[in-house]
Amino acid sequence: MSDERISDDARSDPVLYVHWCEQPGCEKWGSFGFAVGRSEPKWFCYEHRPEWKSNHAARPQH
Ligand SMILES: [Zn+2]
């Protein structure tokens, strides 16, 4: 009885979508996703993540 279910090719990786840092040359894992509007989210690592905090928002409030 060879009922062994050897699932070699069934390695279900928990991460389906691999997203690395979008910074050219950076090979780090983009753990920070930034979606602007309806565009697809861009992923950056900790070092290259954009300054999301708008503490110094230079927007003319007019
Ligand atoms: Zn990076």
Image (cartoon, helix red, strand yellow):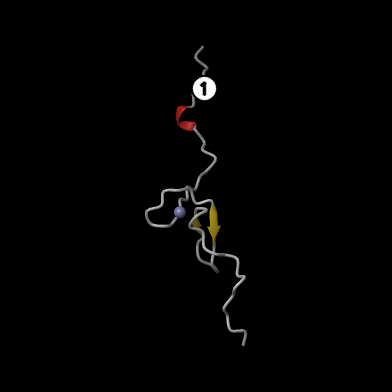
Which residue is denoted by mark 1 in the rendering? 5
At x 51% / y 38%, what residue is drawn?
13
Q: Residue 8 at x, y = what percent?
A: 46, 27
Residue toward you, 25 or 43: 25
**In the orientation shown, which residue stands out farthest toward the front?**
56
Q: Is mark 1 within 8 Å of ligand 1?
A: no
Q: Residue at x 52, y 17 (%)?
A: 3
Number of residue marks? 1
- For numbered disc 1, what is the local secondary structure? loop
In percent of width and height, residue 27 lies at: 41, 48
Residue type at numbered disc 1: Arg
Q: Is residue 62 left or right of residue 17?
A: right
Placement of the C terminus among the 4 image quadrants: bottom right
The residue at 49%/33% (across/down) is 11
Q: Is residue 22 left or right of residue 50?
A: left
Establish if 34 lies above or below 59: above
The quadrant where ligand 1 appears is bottom left
Q: List x then y, in percent, for residue 20.
A: 45, 50
Residue extending furthest toward the left: 25
Q: Is residue 32 above or below residue 6?
A: below
